[in-house]
Amino acid sequence: MRLFAYRRFPVAFLFIWLVIIFVAVTYFMSKGPQCDGYANELEAVKLQVRQLAEMNDRLQELVRKNNAKKHTQDDSKDKAIPKDKVFNNQDISSDNLQQQQTISYEREKVRRRIANGAKEVWYFINAQLKKMLADNNELRFKIDDILSYVMNQTHALQIDTQVLGDINGLKEIRHQKLTQLKQMLIQRLDNLQNPADCSKSRRLLCKLNKGCGYGCQMHHAVYCLIVAYATKRTLLLDTNGWRYMPRNGWNGYYKPLSPSCSVTSEGQATQWDGHQDSDLVVYLPISDSITRRPPYLPLAVPKDMSETLLTHHGHPFVWFVGHMMRYLLRWQPTTTNFLEDKKKTLKFEHPIVGIHVRRTDKINSEAALHTIDEYMIHVEEYYQKMKRTSKVPVKRVFIATDEPAVVAEAKKKYKDYVFISDSQASKSAALNSRYSDESLRGVILDIELLAQSDYLVCTFSSQVCRLAYEIMQTYHDDASQYFHSLDDIYYFGGQNMHRHRAIYPHAARGSGEINLEVGDIIAVAGNHWDGYSKGRVQGKGYDGLYPSYKTEDVPDVADFAAYD
């Protein structure tokens, strides 16, 4: 047990506080009035450190409640918990789980909030101190020292909140509940895609003809599968004229979605208008063109799965779409053999961090250029955090890129790392050969190895990056935090509104910030990775920046078709 670790928290936070105060005050006293601007920045940093202390208090309270529940012999305490906040796990039979058969959603939500809040404080302190460093390079040694201490203590807090989520059988319960949910979803999809009489079944027709790259096309296909599942229709995916045009077609790489149903022509289908329950075949357009948008579009999760997902996963929709994507992309044996052979050839072994470095056509049109150094900062942070709990014999990195020179640059600059990459995949991703068999195999390999990595560093502006993150969820119970995006937050193209709810009030402190009242709903535009997010407050008409830790995600739960 590591419950003793929580006793370190107050001392650890006090130490950070004293280091920052001592270093900063010493410096400012030596420099005098010219540092007034830095003093203002310091006040902002001090405010965020106080928030770390508040997170520590909440974590301590969780630990006290956990210990009280563990040692009490009075079962009436469990009975007093509201039914809508606790989900029974009577199917767990292992002896070591008998004492802990319930998991509280509220408890898990607060635990995740603490871990996320610690990360947001780190983003803020890191950004503010580096801003001070840009203004005065004389501070470099002192600021680097402070950042090192704060990063280490942030890692300690994140590790301990993870431990809190795994102790007393909670890890085993989470695994069993999510495994059961996955099996239920697969069974439902199997039944849906294999009707007894296809001619009499309700079907949804989609075309894989969206004029974009592989990741974008797969997200279009899985959007179709989600709508089919939500409306209880068999999905017919028309892959004729697929932009990649592999010699063997879709079935040359993936198993057919519906072996018993053939694709119907669009002329025999009713065009989507959102109200065709009685029509046998309905044609679904791309998400950007859909009219009468139903509530079950992304980022919604099915209501009958929501209790389990909200309790046991940090990003419920990503779990749902990841498993839907895995069902869509079920490999043919030849594809599986190709992937396994490549893994052996490349010596793809764990631990490993996967990075996806975009270049070529996407730069300056869809995304900014990010240097290899920007990726490696977060790779190094991952391995430094890992070293706190286990040995790291080799710091291994898998690079997926459309620019072969990136790999050579990484090997030259970071000699204490082992880099692996498939040069054929990089070359085939070039614009002049992107839509070919070789290119398709290359992108399949890149996405699969990124998804199988232990941690992912990429840009969520990239469909490939988001696709790898989604599929990553199928390899773990909860991999919602196993990533760092250099630009966007996670999103799904054509999604319904992503919402935050204010849990603390906020008074704007400067230009660009907005006021928040507890309960305000914010349409999220993005996270600046400096402690602030941007969004528009619903019903009040203003938008701007607000501290990320003062809000929480609003779960998007919708009614899907009923299944037995």
Image: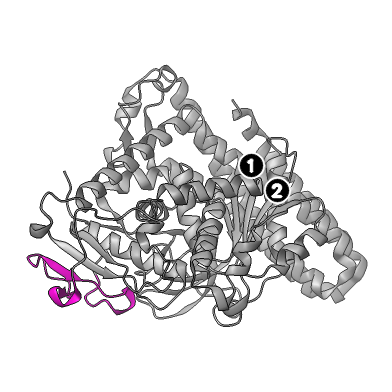
- Left or right relative to 61: residue 149: right
* Callout 1 amino acid: His
Q: Tell me residue 532's x, y (percent).
A: 57, 67
Establish if 162 lies above or below 528: above
- Which quadrant of the figure has residue 293? bottom left
- Could you tell me if residue 520 is visible in this image? no
Q: Looking at this view, is 6 or 298 the one in front?
A: 298
Q: Looking at this view, is 154 or 336 the one in front?
A: 336
Numbered range of the magenta stretch = 265-293
Q: Tell me residue 49's x, y (percent).
A: 67, 55
Determine the residue positioned at 7% across, 58% down: 200
Establish if 269 lies above or below 91: below
As drawn, the residue found furthest toward the front would be 247
Q: Which residue is mark 2?
A: 396
Q: Residues within 10 Å of mark 1 (few under 14, many from 20)?
A: some
Q: Which residue is mark 1?
A: 350
- Please tell me whether the stretch drawn in magenta is mainly helix, strand or loop: loop
- Could you tell me if residue 134 is visible in this image? yes
Establish if 274 lies above or below 302: below
* Callout 2 amino acid: Arg
